Image (cartoon, grey):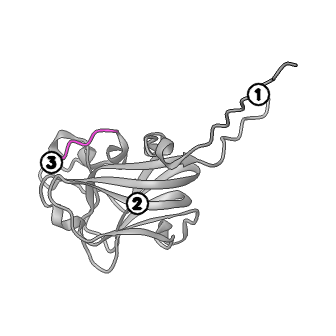
Amino acid sequence: MKLLLLVVLVWTASDEASADNNLALEGRATMSSIWMDPDNHQSFLGMAMNGIDGNTDSVYFHGSCFHTGLDSPAWYRVDLLRTSRIVSISITNRGDYGNRTNGAEIRIGDSLANNGNNNPRCAVVTSIADGETRTCQCNNMVGRYVNIVLTGKTEYLHLCEVQIFGENLTQDIPCAE
């Protein structure tokens, strides 16, 4: 008599596996406006894409931060290009004037109503120190758009990195041949 042993391994995505996958690196970013330097009328330092470039350098003048104009509300949005399950979001504050970010809401969803600022809230950044990186747990919220918005005040919004950890739930749609 022979004994046959069959072992089946099933791999499933877990929070730990998706916690290392920064979805923002493949996303597209936009924001309420861009700050223009009054001395040289340039805005390249504060462009939206700087916030998802993978560089957490918190010195604004090194060129890896985004910076809105003085808006009400000031907001920043990452389009992940597909619906995703979000485990956590890490934000790196600018190394100076960081108190401007206090009170920012992080919102996740599939709607672009009110520029995406009406989507469900993941977290509120009550306070974050200059140059600090803070991680907010989003408990597997699902959405395509991740917004950071300063509601109820007129302020500049600037961060030096937005990292969005999770997993894509939908695949790219291939082009027809």
Q: For the point 48% across and 40% down, which residue is it? A: 26
Which residue is the site of mark 3?
40
Cβ atoms at labels 2 and 1 below 8 Å apart = no
Q: For the point 21% across and 63% down, which residue is it? A: 128
Q: Position of residue 5 (x, y in %)?
A: 76, 26
Farthest residue in the right direction?
1
Amino acid type at circle 1 is: Leu
> Is label 3 or label 2 in front?
2
Tell me the quadrant of the picture where the N terminus can be found: top right
Residue 57 in magenta?
A: yes
The rendered magenta stretch, by its main secondary structure, is classed as: loop
Cβ atoms at labels 3 and 2 below 8 Å apart = no
Which residue is the site of mark 1?
6
Which residue is the site of mark 2?
137
Q: For the point 84% across and 19% down, which residue is it? A: 2
Amino acid type at circle 2 is: Gln
Q: CA distance from mark 1 to mark 3?
A: 70 Å
Cβ atoms at labels 1 and 3 below 8 Å apart = no
Task: State the extent of the magenta-drawn residues as a range.
Answer: 54-59
- In this picture, is 126 found above or below 177? below
